[in-house]
Image: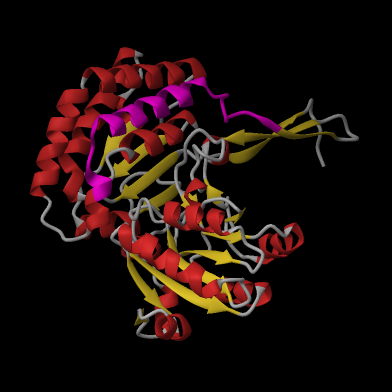
Amino acid sequence: MNTLLSIETRNNVLLTMAKLLDEHRAEIISINKKDCDAYKGDDISMFDRLKVNDAKVDEMIVAATHLASQEDPVGVERFSFKHENGMQVYNKTASFGSVLIIYESRPDVTVEAAGIAFKSGNKILLKGGKESLNSNLKIVALWHQALKEHNASTDWVEYLQFNRTETQAFLEKPTQKVDLIVPRGGERLIAFVKQHATCPVIISGRGNNFVYVEKEADINIAFDVILNGKSKISACNAVDKVLVDENLPNKKEFINQLISKLKADKIEVLGDAIVAINHNLEQISSDDVWYEEFLDYKIVIGEIANNEASIAKINQYSGGHSAAIITINDTVAKVFMENIDCAAVYHNASTRFTDGGQLGLGGELAISTDKLHQRGPIGLQHLVTNKWYVHGNGQIR
């Protein structure tokens, strides 16, 4: 077992990691190009997440540097109590111990998610996808260099070069201690991990996010929020469904304008029965489409009776990730936000802000759609468990 590294060592490793990423920038991009060239799949969102350019390296550097500047999340007192028998009782945050991150395609996870887990005092096990193997191995080599520079064991960050069968065997009978698993990827990966894991799993669930344009909407805000929601189709915080209030003034004109703006951005627009007929769109094949997360240049527009109906529809079909209401009526917005069963709810703002960095956490390990242990973006301060410290001088019960 690795003894908890001091906060100074953890911070220094992160700062060295930031320096090494900058120094090896050209090499990382060049190695990543090999991974991109070798990718033969047709999943455009997977390819988008695979690619590393200067901006992506900058983001990794910012993440490592910012993590080094944050308070230690381990050992924070959450509760204290003086027992009548004189014992002093504390409850403090504690690291999980060992965190396995299983992810597809995204080499930046090798820095950002691993960095959060490392700063929280955990040993990191990384299992990336085969499509990003070379990029990941290069970044892990930099982790090892940073650890060695500060006399820390390279065991703190370990890359598991497993195929699917080996991964399944490891999940079912781990050959080393694993306290928590975080799958980062599509629904198939998450289902695979849930099926085989023998320890707790944080579910970073599907997106399938909705925007409800209420009858008192500012339509310019509606256009901005919906188009921004489709600006990065590979993101789990992207918008896939738009519900338009049937009593919106100039509704037909609004939907027509929205369709032409989306099509100008090369987005395929589908409609429910009413919208498809009235606006000459392809109709969705069945109601099951409302459940789908597209991760594609695709969106569905439907009509809805009112706020109550939109809440019911979103709660039935969405992935529990993010939903937004566009309205100038604060009372209506409050009812929507209190009753939508999603990790993040928005009033007149884009769902694209469901992100640890954007919501003030610095970065995120994942965006959880589970209600335990933490919901929404999981930042540094959430990647801890807790532990009771009890000080006595011979008390017995």
Front-lying residue, 381 or 61: 61
Q: Is residue 51 magenta?
A: yes
User: Considering depth in this image, is 162 or 20 the residue closer to the camera?
Assistant: 20
> Which x, y percent locates residue 220?
54, 55
Q: Find residue 311 and report its image quarter.
A: bottom right
Name the colour scheme.
Answer: secondary structure
In the image, is 368 to the left or to the right of 132?
Answer: right
Determine whether, in the image, residue 52 is placed left or right of residue 325: left
Quadrant containing the C terminus is top right
Stretch of the chain drawn in magenta = 48-77
On the picture, is 390 further left or further right than 119?
right
The answer to whether residue 178 is left or right of residue 337 is: left
Quarter holding the N terminus? top left
Indicate whether 87 appears above or below 188: above
Residue occupying image coordinates x 32% and y 32%: 157
Principal secondary structure, stretch drawn in magenta: helix
Residue 128 seen anywhere in this rendered image of the structure:
no
- 53, above or below 193, in the image: above
Residue at 34% across / 60% down in the picture?
A: 186
Residue that extends furthest to the right in the rendered view of this protein: 84
Residue 383 horizontal/vertical position (percent): 52, 40
Residue toward you, 50 or 330: 330
Residue 72 in which image quadrant: top right
Q: Is residue 70 visible in this depiction of the protein?
A: yes
Instruction: Find residue 135 and report its horizontal and vertical position in percent.
Output: 19, 37
- Residue 97 image offset from top left, x and y in percent: 47, 38
Q: Is 158 covered by the magenta stretch? A: no
* Residue 27 lies in quadrant: top left
